[in-house]
Structure formats: structure tokens, C-alpha cells
Amino acid sequence: MALAQTKTAAAVKESVYAWEGKDKTGKTVRGELRAGGEAVVNVTLRRQGVMVTKVKKKRYRSGKKITDKDISLFTRQLATMMKAGVPLLQSFDIVGKGHSNPSMSKLIMELRGDIETGTSLNNAFRKYPLYFDPLFCNLVGAGEQAGILEDLLTRLAIYKEKTLAIKAKIKSALIYPVSILGIAFIVTAVIMIWVVPAFKTVFESFGANLPTPTVIVMDISDFFVSYWWAIFGSLFAGLYFFFQAWQRSAKMQRFMDLTLLKAPIFGSVIRKAAIARWTRTLATMFAAGVPLVEALDSVGGAAGNALYMEATKKIQNEVSTGTSLTVAMQNANVFPPMVTQMVAIGEESGALDSMLAKVAGFFEDEVDEAVASLASLMEPLIMVILGVLIGGLVVAMYLPIFKLGAVV
């Protein structure tokens, strides 16, 4: 019976209530309280000597999806508030009420409610694993234990900002050519379905043999006109199932990660980005005082690549048996000599975190330069592809007209 009551109490969904009342001196006071209902709010405040006059459940308007950028901004704002000496609960109030995304405001106020009831900041974050990964929670926990929470929140903010910057650069490098080629495919399909058939009607009235390029283009056009629904349907279905498999299948993720690393143009950029994130994560964890073996738990996933995740597990196993980090990284065969040499210097000098941070900074700069070079390289390459594709179609369609003009 007692167990059933406990489960029922745990199942009650708590909400945030805005209240107004008068204290023992008759002064009007206001505030917010997280509780399971208005009755609970009244009882709680009455025990505190407040005569409640108004209680209203606070409703949040629906907002956008919470992104990594929202979490990064929240971390930076919270770190700034705490460095300025603002109490933790008040910091959550200021950040939550001033956020532009209502969904994020709701999350922040729910975190505030948990902390107000005595939950540690680390455990409050762990209730929302969708937004706060183990690395985030581990660093916050280390900061709470060591009494340097504001410093570690600053480190976390820097780490998240750097990671987001690298992700944005990689996405911009990949999205630009893909979007241009996608638009080129759509334009080509439109020409094949609507423009070429109009030319075909004119050419049939000539009563002469057509050039081979024109015949090929017209045959392709006939295929597009007859099976456009199958072409576009299979294309969209293929892309959908491909990305679903990429997200859900570990084998598919590993295959794609290895393929991207071996890609002729983008492979080096993706490898440098993975190394930058790997070293930045380990530097942040190690500087926070997290033991090396424990820190490596979070590092593999933060690299964002299956190859480096597998390599990290091997490194962790070797380090746990007494092997130095430098030797373990050399045995993994996924890091360039410069990285392992810098790590060796860091281990010998006792400044491993600063050396790892320097390596991360170096590769982040390398990614910046590589993305800039890719942008300048891809533009003429895409122009050539578009010129050959669209220009070839135009020439193929005008060849019979040129031939007719020569005959006349």
C-alpha cells in the first residue's frame, strides 16, 4: 500500500505557479514555486507565514526546438552571472526570463525548480540527457565538488562555442556544393520534362536524321516524362532511408564515417575537425581535474566519428593498464606525429591540458583555412560542372538548327 502511494506521488506532474500574497508584516510579496498543484502551493506558503491571495499556473508558449546553440548560450550566460557574484537561483531567473526561445525558458525554470528543492546542479542537469550530455554533467559535478563551478562553466562555454564553430564550418563546406548540385538536378529535370519535348515536336517536322547528342537527350527526356514520378519518388525515398539508416545503424554510421575520412576533397577537413574536437574535449576534462581514464569515456563520443570512438576505447584500455597516453595514442594509428609529440611533451612537463588545448587550437585554425580554401576551390569546380551539364543540353538541342541552317 505504501509502495503504491509512493508511486502515485512520484507520478504527479509538477508545474511552475506564480503566486502573490502578504507576509507576516502585511507586505505584498510575489514569487514562483514549482509544485504538484495549487493546494500544495497554498500549504507550502502558509507554512512559510505567507497569506496567499493569488495563485496562477504559469504557462509557456510553444517555442522552437532547443538546439546546441541555445545550450551553449545558456552555459555562457550562467558562467558570466556566477562570476559576477549573482546567486545561483537568481542567475537562473535572469537567464530563463530573458531567453528568446520559450522552450529553453521552460527548461531553465524547470532546472531552477529542481535546484530550489535541494537537488545539486549536476543531478538537475542529468535529468535532461537530451540536452546535457555526460561530459557536461561530469564537468559540472567536478566543479561543484572542487568549489570552482564558475571556472568550469566558463571552460564548458568555451568548449561548446569552439565545438559549435567547427560543426558550422564543416556543415557550410558540405552544404554549399550539395545544395548547388541539387538545384542543378531540379533545373535539368525541368528542362527534360517541359523544354525538350517542345523542341522534339519541332524537330520531328524537319523529316531529317538528328545528331547523336540530340537523340540521346531526347531519349533521356522521354524517360523523364514517362517515369518522373518513379525518379523523384525513388530519389526522395532513397535519401530518407539512407539518413534513417545513418542515424540508427551503428554499422552504417561506421561505414559513412570511414568513407568521409577517405573522401578526396573533404576527408582531410573532417579528420582535422575530429582531432580538434577530441583534443579540445580531453583538454577541458583533464583541466577540470577529471582522472584520465574517466575523461576518456566522454572523449570518444565527442569526436563525432566512429573511427576515433573505437580508437579512444583502445587508448582507454591501454592507459588503464599503465601505458602512457602518448604510447597508447601512437598505437591507435589515427593521430598524426605532431599530436603525439605534443602530448609527449605535455606528459613530461606536467602540462598535458595546456598542450592538448594548443593542439586543439592549431587544428581549429587548420579547419578554418581548409574550409576557406575549399570554398574558393569548389566555386570554379561547380561552375564547370554546371557549364558542362546545362551547356551540353543547350548545344544538343541547337545542333539540328545549326545543321538545318548549313543546309539552307
Image (tube, rainbow, N blue to C red):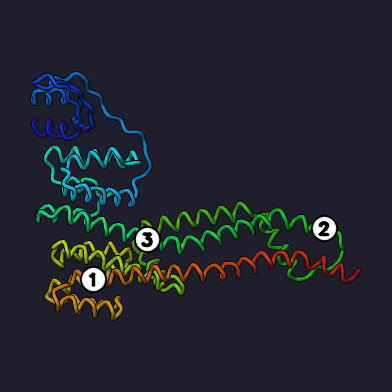
Q: Is residue 215 visible?
A: no
Pointer 2 or 3: first along the chain:
3
Residue linked to disc 1: 356
Give the position of the N terminus as an image quadrant. Answer: top left
Q: Name the residue that disc number 2 marks.
A: 202
> Mark 3 Cα within 10 Å, few/some/many (few <14, many 20+)?
some
| Other-residue count near label 2 (Cα within 10 Å), few / some / many at <14 / 14–19 / ≥20 | few
Q: Do the numbered discs 1 and 3 sit on residues whose CB atoms are within 8 Å?
A: no
Mark toward the start of the polypeptide (1 vs 3): 3
Query: Could you tell which of marks 1 and 2 lies nearer the N-terminus?
Result: 2
Q: Secondary structure at mark 2?
A: helix
Could you tell me which residue is drawn at 33 percent across and 52 percent down?
A: 68
* Residue in the image at 11% along x and 40% along y: 118
The label on residue 204 is: none
Estimate the spatial distance between the alpha carbons at disc 2 and disc 3, rounded to whole Å: 52 Å
**Image quadrant where residue 225 sits:** bottom right
Q: CA distance from mark 1 to mark 3?
A: 19 Å
**Position of residue 69 measured from the top left corner of the image (x, y, whole percent):** 34, 51
Q: Which mark is residue 167?
A: 3
In the drawing, does residue 150 fall left or right of residue 173?
left
Q: Kindly identify the amino acid type of the residue bearing the numbered disc 2.
A: Val
Closest to the observer, 319 or 59:
59
Label 1 packing within 10 angstroms: few (<14), some (14-19), many (20+): many
Vertically, is 28 above or below 4? above
* Residue 152 placement: quadrant: bottom left
> Vertical placement of 267 versus 56: above or below?
below
Image quadrant in which the C terminus is located: bottom right
Is 16 or 323 nearer to us in this picture? Answer: 16
Nearer the camera: disc 2 or disc 3? 3
Q: Position of residue 274 (x, y in %)?
A: 33, 68
